[in-house]
Amino acid sequence: MSETPESYEAAVERLEQIIDRLDSGQAGLRETLELCREGRELVTYCSAELDAVSEGLEELRLDELAAKLEATPTDS
Amino acid sequence: MDLPGPFPVGRYARKLQEELRRRARVLLVGEVTGISRSKVQAYFELRDAEGAVPCAIWLDDLEKAGLPEGGLRDGAEVVIAGGPDYYPGGGQASPSFSFRATHVRLAGEGDLLARLEALRGQLRREGLFELQKQLARPRLPKTIGVVTAESGAARRDLLAGLGRRGWAGTVVWAFAPVQDRRAAPAIAAAIQELAATPAVEAIVVARGGGSLADLWAFCDETLCRTVAMLRVPVISAVGHERDSTLIDDVAAVACSTPTHAAEAAVPLDCVAARGALERSAEALRRAGEGAVGNRSRHLVALARGPARALRRERVALNQKTREIRAASERGLAERRTFQHRIAAVVLGRAARRAAGAEADSRREALRRAEVAFRAHDPERTLERGYALAEDGEGEPVTSAAAAVAAGRVKLRFADGRVGAKIDRHGESDERDA
C-alpha cells in the first residue's frame, strides 16, 4: 500500500470520493486505473480493520491489561 | 506595636464566642464525613468540593430531627440549620470552633438540584462542557474502556449493544463503586487510568438509573473536571433518560442507556460496513473492467474506422468514375455527332461551292476517271478472252497454290461460269517441264 490511511473513517471517506469520481465518468483511463488501484488498497485496509474487531470479543480487566502492558517491551 | 491590649485570653475567648453566636443562623448543605459521637453530642464535618466546616449537634436535637435509622452517616447529603459557635475551653479542656447545628434533615432532590445547577453554571462558564465534544471519536475503535459496577445490568446491556453492532474488539473493564458521593474519587481514578492506557480509544462510564442522591457521585465537581480535561472521549450513560448528571454535560456524548452508549462508543455498524465495503469493491471492479473494456471496444471501433472509411471512399470513387466515364462517353458521342454535323455542313458548303465555276472541269475529270476505270475493269479483260478463277465463295483465286488448296474452282468467262477441278498432276507436269 502506497500510504496507510490515517483511520478507518479517513479510508472510507477517500473510498467514497473515489467511487463518486469513477461514477461521474469524467476520469480518463490512466486516472481510472489509478483510482481503482487506490480504491482496492483502501478496501483491503478497511476489510482488515473490520476483521480486527470481528474475531471474538476480548474482555480484560484494567489491572490485567496494566500487567500485560508492563510485560510487553515498548517500541520506544 | 500600637495595638489595643494586652487582654487576658480567657476573656477574649468568651468575647469571640459571643460574637460568633450573634451571627445569623443559616442552612448549610453538604456531605457528612467523619462522624463521631460522645455521650451528649454528635460531631461530623459537612463538606463539598470547595471546603468544609466542623459541625456538632446535641443528641437531643438530633433525635428531634427524626432522621431515619442510620440517616446521619458518612456520605449522606444533609441540610443543617444553625450558626457558628466557639467553645473557649477551660482549665484542662481544649477550645474548639464548630458550627452548632440545631436541626438536620437529609438533603432532598430540590437541594441537590439547586447545588447541581450552581455547579453546572460554573463549569459551563469555564467552557468545560465543550472540551470533550471537540475530540475526534474513532468510528471503529479496536479497544474501549468501560467504568461501571462489576455486578450490574449496565455491564450486560453494554455487551449486548456491542454485539448488535457486530463489534467484537477488546473491552477493558475498570470496575468501580458507583453509589453515592464517596464513589466519585474511585470513578475518577478508573477513568484516568483507562485514559492513560494507550490502546483505549474511547471510555464508557455506565450506571443504571436511581435517585439523584444515588447518582450524586456523577455530579462530583472533581470527577467532572477530570473528565472534561481528558484527551480520550468519554461517553456517559448514567441513569435513565430523565436523569441529568453533571458528567453528562462534560462528556463527549451523553446516552440514556448503556445500549446507546455501546452504539456511541462504536459508531460504525460493522455488519452494515462490511456490506458497504463489498459494494465498494464491486463498484471498483466494475469501474476498472469497464474502463479497459469500454475503451478497448472504442479503440477497436476507431481502428476499424479508417478501413471502413477507405472502403466507403473507394465505393464512392468507383461510382464517380463510372459516372464520369458515362458522362464523357455521352460527351464524346455528342461531340462526334456535333463534329459530323459540322463536317456535313462544311462539305455541303464546299459541294455547293464546287457546283459553281468548277463544274465543267470536274465533269471532264470525271469522264477521264471513268475511262481509266473501265480500262482496269476485269469484265473488259474477260471480253478479251481471259477467264477469272473463283473459289466456292466467289472470291478470286489468284495463285496456283490457292487453286490446289481450293481443289475445285469456277472459271468465269465473259459469257458465264463453268466449274473446274484442279489437277495436281498438271501442276507437277508444268513444274517438270
Image (cartoon, rainbow, N blue to C red):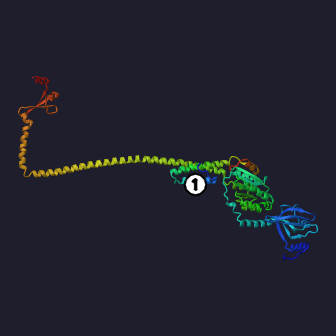
Locate the N terminus of chain B and report the quarter of the image it occupies. bottom right
Query: Is B288 or B234 nearer to us in this picture?
Result: B234
Q: Is residue A54 left or right of residue A35?
A: right
Locate the C terminus of chain B and report the quarter of the image it occupies. top left
Q: Please state the horizontal and vertical placement of residue B378, each as a whole percent of the image.
A: 9, 35
Query: Is B41 or B290 nearer to us in this picture?
Result: B41
Query: Is A76 or A39 nearer to us in this picture?
Result: A76
Q: Please state the horizontal and vertical placement of residue B200, each as a whole percent of the image.
A: 71, 53
Res. B283 in view: no
Q: Residue furthest front?
A: B1
Q: Is residue B166 left or right of residue B398?
A: right
In the rendered view, tell whether residue B401 sits above or below residue B226: above
Secondary structure of residue under mark 1: helix
Name the residue beneath numbered marker 1. A17
Among the 4 quarters of the image, the one containing residue B65: bottom right
Q: Disc count in the image?
A: 1
Query: Is B220 or A20 nearer to us in this picture?
Result: B220
Q: Is residue B263 left or right of residue B103?
A: left
Type of residue at label 1?
Answer: Gln
In the rendered view, tell whether residue A25 sits above or below residue B420: below
Q: Please state the horizontal and vertical placement of residue B379, each as a whole percent of the image.
A: 8, 36
In the rendered view, tell whether residue B292 sits above or below residue B89: above
Q: Please state the horizontal and vertical placement of residue B338, each as a whole percent of the image.
A: 21, 51
* Chain hosting mark 1: A
